[in-house]
Image (tube, rainbow, N blue to C red):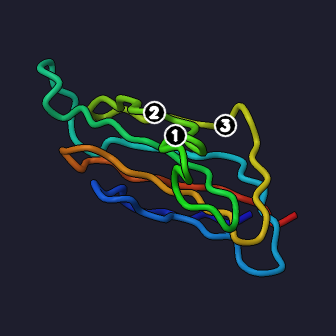
Amino acid sequence: MAIINGQLSIADKTHLTVPAGKRYAITTIMVCNTQPADTGGNNDTTFDLHVVPSGQTKGNSDPNANQIINNLVVAGADTFTFDTEKLVLEEGDKIITASQAPANLVMSISYLEV
């Protein structure tokens, strides 16, 4: 098993690109808001997640064509876990995110080579 960690940014960020000749099974994606909880929601942050097939761009001709999470709110001190479904990615496939301000989110991707 391998793990990739990274911070989400307001601009599109590619967190994972499957290398040539490889296939990855994504077992878990966790997105954590590193700021404290607050009753006013000032530390809440939303994000989008795209799974982009090799040869395509994020959104392709349709801006939402490969989007699997849309504007999901992660409250301060909370963690979102995506582990119900497994994703199998082929050579050149990518996982791309974008968050909105404030940029409080970090992500961990756990995968196996298959």
Q: Which residue is mark 1?
A: 64
Q: Is residue 1 left or right of residue 106?
A: right
Tell me the quarter of the picture where residue 77 sits: top left
Q: Secondary structure at mark 2?
A: strand
Q: Furthest residue to the front?
A: 61
Q: Residue 67 appears at what percent x and percent y?
A: 55, 41
At 31% from the left and 59% from the top, the residue drawn is: 11
- Residue 21: x and y in percent read 83, 79
**Residue position marked by numbered label 3 in the rendering:** 83
Identify the secondary structure beneath mark 1: loop
Position of residue 50 in the picture relative to residue 74 (left or right) = right
Binning the other alpha carbons within 10 Å of mark 1 as few (below 14), some (14 to 19) or many (20 upward) gives some
Q: Amino acid at mark 2?
A: Asn
* C-alpha gap between disc 3 and disc 2: 17 Å
Q: Nearer the N terminus, badge 3 or badge 1?
A: 1
Please identify the quadrant where the C terminus is shown.
bottom right
* Viewer-nearest of discs 1 and 2: 1
User: How crowded is the residue under tag 2: few (<14 C-alpha within 10 Å), some, or many (20+)?
Assistant: few
Q: Residues within 10 Å of mark 3 (few under 14, many from 20)?
A: few
Residue at the extreme top: 39
Does 111 appear above or below 23? Answer: above
- Residue 70's label in the rendered image is 2
**Amino acid at circle 3:** Asp
- Gap in angstroms between the C-alphas marked 1 and 2: 9 Å
Which of the image's four quarters has the N terminus? bottom right
Towards the viewer: 40 or 14 = 14
Residue 102 occupies quadrant: top left
Please tell me whether mark 3 sits on a helix, a strand or a loop: loop
Tag 1–tag 2 contact (CB < 8 Å) = yes
In the picture shown, does residue 69 fall above or below 41? below
